Each structure stands twice: as structure tokens, then as C-alpha cells.
Amino acid sequence: MSALDWIFLVIAVFLIIVTLLQGGKSEGASGAITGGGMNVFAKTKERGVDRVLSIITYVLVAIFFLIAILVKVL
């Protein structure tokens, strides 16, 4: 495995971990069945740790796709 493959693997693992650390943003299927979550269009901003994890996730996804393209091309 080349260095680019190892970096790709590490980014993928970090992306999985950061995604699992994020909390759920909705009630899921139970809320849809029972009619919960009527504030669908309410403005709620991410704050604190949720915002940081969200930003880290976006950055890791961008790096993941760039490295995926590089691995395929090279």
C-alpha cells in the first residue's frame, strides 16, 4: 500500500468516528408515525460541540472525496 492509500484509510476511519459522535437531529421514524416534531421549519442553529463536529465532518468529507479521486487517477 502506498502512502496515499494509508492516508485514505485514516481519513475514512476518522470520518466514521466523527459521524458516529454526532447526535441525531430528528426524532426518526417514531416521530413521523406519532406526529411528533411539528417544529419542522423552526430555525435551530448548531452550537458548541455539535457545530464543531459538523464542520469537521464537512472538511473530512471534502478531503475523502479528493483523495478518492487521486487514488483512482494515480
Image: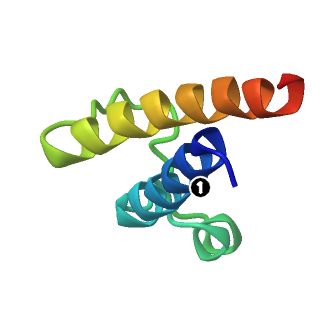
Q: Colour mode? A: rainbow
Q: Residues within 10 Å of mark 1 (few under 14, many from 20)?
A: some
In the displayed structure, would residue 1 be above or below residue 65?
A: below
Extreme residue toward the left, this view = 48
- Image quadrant occupied by the N terminus: bottom right
| Callout 1 amino acid | Leu
Q: For this view, does 57 lie left or right of residue 36? A: left
* Left or right, residue 15 beside residue 56: right
Residue at 52% x, 64% y is 36
Q: Secondary structure at mark 1?
A: helix
Residue name at image x 74 percent, y 34 percent: 68
Task: Give the residue at the far front of this rendering.
Answer: 2
> How far from the left and from the top, in percent, is residue 56?
35, 36
Classify the position of the C terminus by image quarter: top right
Image coordinates of residue 10 in percent, x first then y, are 49, 54
Q: Residue 6, percent across and down?
A: 57, 52
Q: Quadrant of residue 17?
A: bottom left
Rendering quarter of residue 51: top left
Up/down of 56 relative to 9, above or below: above
Q: Is residue 58 above or below residue 33?
A: above
Q: How many numbered marks, from 0 up?
A: 1
User: Outermost residue, right direction?
Assistant: 73
Q: Nearer the viewer, residue 18 or 48?
A: 18
Residue nearest the viewer, comparing 73 with 43:
73
Residue at 47% x, 30% y: name it.
58
In this figure, which residue is indicated by the disc labeled 1?
9
Q: Quarter-wise, where is residue 73 in the image?
A: top right
Position of 29 with respect to 59 (left or right) is right
